[in-house]
Amino acid sequence: MPVTLARLAADTDKLLNHQAVADYSGALNGLQLANRGRVTKIAAAVDVNLPTVRAAIAAAADLLVAHHGLAWSPLLPLTGRRYELLKLCLDHNLAVYSSHLPLDLHAKLGNNILLAKALGFTVSAPFFVEKGRPIGRRVRAKISRDALRYRLCRALGADSQLIAAGPATCRVIGIVSGGAGNELARAAADGVDTFITGEGAHWTFSLAHELGVNVFYGGHYLTETFGVKALSAYLAKKYRLPWEFISVPSGL
């Protein structure tokens, strides 16, 4: 049975605590683009771009739930590919709902707690404060660097880049999905000997060796598939709706 878009969006805002969680100005968490008012199928994607919108339309979805929404690049002027993307959404009744940091840090549906669990760590603690709240997870364990790399590869479905600058046995592991590599010094100051994130700059290779910290770069995209999948599955179950994940890997 169709559910109203307004109800679903309001309930999801509350679930993810959007009103209380600060974020970057481009995030615009919540409903970013309306449709004609009903939801019959959910598509989940990491990013809102032409490939994901086209795939969501092909899947007959009328709501696209994403981690990176419409506003990361300038919304105006509405010309060229930006016009094409919005026209496709409007012509095909596709609403867009996005959640960034609130979905990173959520205690059940968040990217970081789910990545920690996918690595086999069922106990983790909040870690890495961003915009006033800890968005990542810290794990205390005793696992070899090679075994951790194998687990990460299995969790992401792809190999990761490793800067093997820390101990061969990892004991304090920090996990922050996405693009936190450039904040390596801050992660090391929080006491981790191993840092798992999506991506970072070239200079972090030298910094990792200066700090004596292992760094795993699993890919910005791949480390942020967990939250949108979990959120969409939750909404689909709650509202008895079909859903599917739109896989458009960036390779980054």
Image (cartoon, grey):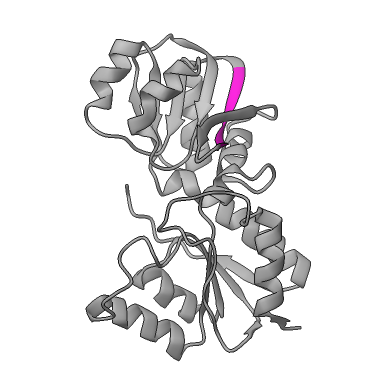
In depth, the one of 211 and 53 nearer the eye is 211
Which residue occupies 31% across, 82% down? 84
Which residue occupies 24% across, 81% down? 79
Which residue occupies 47% across, 40% down? 177
Which residue occupies 37% across, 30% down? 183
Q: What range of the chain is rendered magenta?
A: 133-140
Residue 27 is situated, as x and y percent measured from the top left of the image, at 45, 58
If the image is split into quadrants, where does the N terminus sit?
bottom right
Q: Is residue 139 magenta?
A: yes
Compared with 108, 49 (above or below) is below
Residue 242 is situated, as x and y percent measured from the top left of the image, at 67, 73
Among the 4 quarters of the image, the one containing residue 60: bottom right
Image label count: 0
Magenta highlight: main SS: strand
Residue 178 is situated, as x and y percent measured from the top left of the image, at 42, 43
Q: In this view, does 84 lie to the left or right of 26?
A: left
